[in-house]
Image (cartoon, helix red, strand yellow):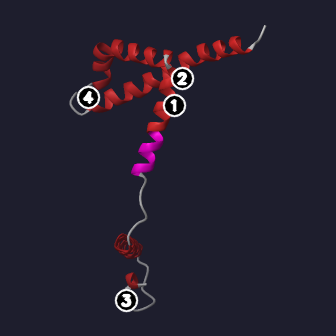
Amino acid sequence: MSWFPVLGTVGYVAGIPLAARLFYGLLRRQIIFLDGRERTDPVGYFDTHDRPGVTAAAVAAGLLWPLTVPVYAAGRIVVTAVTAHPRRSRYERRLDARHVHARIRQLEDELGVPDEAPERDRTRR
């Protein structure tokens, strides 16, 4: 008797609760976040109104985990690749340098650090 069907079945059954828990958490967080802007107690509302539907959807996703987990992972990879931050422009880098130097000057003034060199424009480096 080959052990591959047995191991495959055990792996599939073991993946059901893990995938269901993953998708339950994702759906719960998304619903609470989206409804949380409009409600004073979004968690309480979720517990009384949305929990049965989210539980059923999570169990269905858990039963189909060989399909849902790779699709979810591929979606996350695509979203990460598309929304990754591009290299900052020269203008953005100069603007940040100005803010940093202004903050340093502000902190030096608050601490009473004397200026040893005459004031010069440090942002033109």
Label 4 CA crowd tier, 10 Å (few <14, some 14–19, many 20+): some
Q: Which disc is residue 70 wearing?
A: 1
Question: Which residue in the rendered view is the most extreme toward the bottom?
Answer: 118
The tag on residue 35 is 4
**Image point (64%, 12%), residue name:** 9
Indicate the quadrant where residue 92 lies. bottom left
Q: Which mark is residue 66?
A: 2
- Assign a secondary structure to mark 1: helix
Name which residue type carries label 3.
Glu
Q: Residues within 10 Å of mark 3 (few under 14, many from 20)?
A: few
Magenta stretch bounds = 76-83
Q: CA distance from mark 3 to mark 1?
A: 58 Å
What is the distance, in whole Å, between disc 4 and disc 3 at their CAs?
Answer: 52 Å
Contact, mark 1 vs mark 2 (Cβ under 8 Å):
yes
Q: Which residue is under mark 3?
A: 119
Give the Cα separation between the discs numbered 4 and 1.
28 Å
